[in-house]
Amino acid sequence: MTDEILTIKQVADYLKVNERTIYRLAGNSEIPAFKVGNSWRFKRSELELWIATQQDQYKTTIAVKAADA
């Protein structure tokens, strides 16, 4: 089984955000990442799971706010 490994630039392009945002998220352990030497790397499969988790958290937040209204 192979899992694609992405660079900061590739992740920024994939998520449509600035590279600095990815550096910040990785440095704060807010996005799944690992370092090879001084360079951040990301497994595409872990990013996809992270995205799904973010979507689920957003949906839960919206549902709670709607229930409180």
Image (cartoon, grey):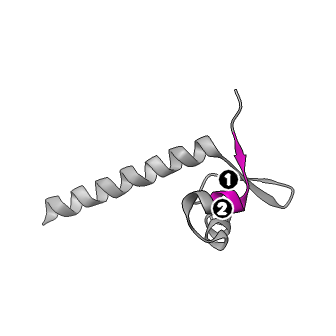
Mark 1 neighbour class, 10 Å CA radius: few under 14, some 14 to 19, many 20 or more = many
Residue 48 image position (x, y, % from top left): 54, 46
Residue 10 image position (x, y, % from top left): 68, 57
Amino acid type at circle 2 is Ala
Residue 21 image position (x, y, % from top left): 61, 70
Residues 48 and 60: in front is: 48
Mark 2 neighbour class, 10 Å CA radius: few under 14, some 14 to 19, many 20 or more = some
Q: Which residues are magenta?
A: 4-11
User: Is 6 covered by the magenta stretch?
Assistant: yes
In primary-sequence order, the first of circles 1 and 2 is 2
Residues 16 and 34: in front is: 16
The residue beneath circle 2 is 26
Report the residue at 15% width, 58% height from top: 67
Q: Residue furthest right?
A: 37
Quadrant of the rendered structure where residue 31 is? bottom right
Amino acid type at circle 1 is Ala
Report the residue at 23% width, 56% height from top: 63
- Badge 1 vs badge 2, beta-carbon distance below 8 Å: yes
Quadrant of the rendered structure where residue 39 is? bottom right
Task: Say whether residue 66 is left or right of residue 51.
Answer: left
Report the residue at 37% width, 50% height from top: 56
The residue beneath circle 1 is 33
In this view, 56 is above or below 4: below
Give the position of the C terminus as an image quadrant: bottom left
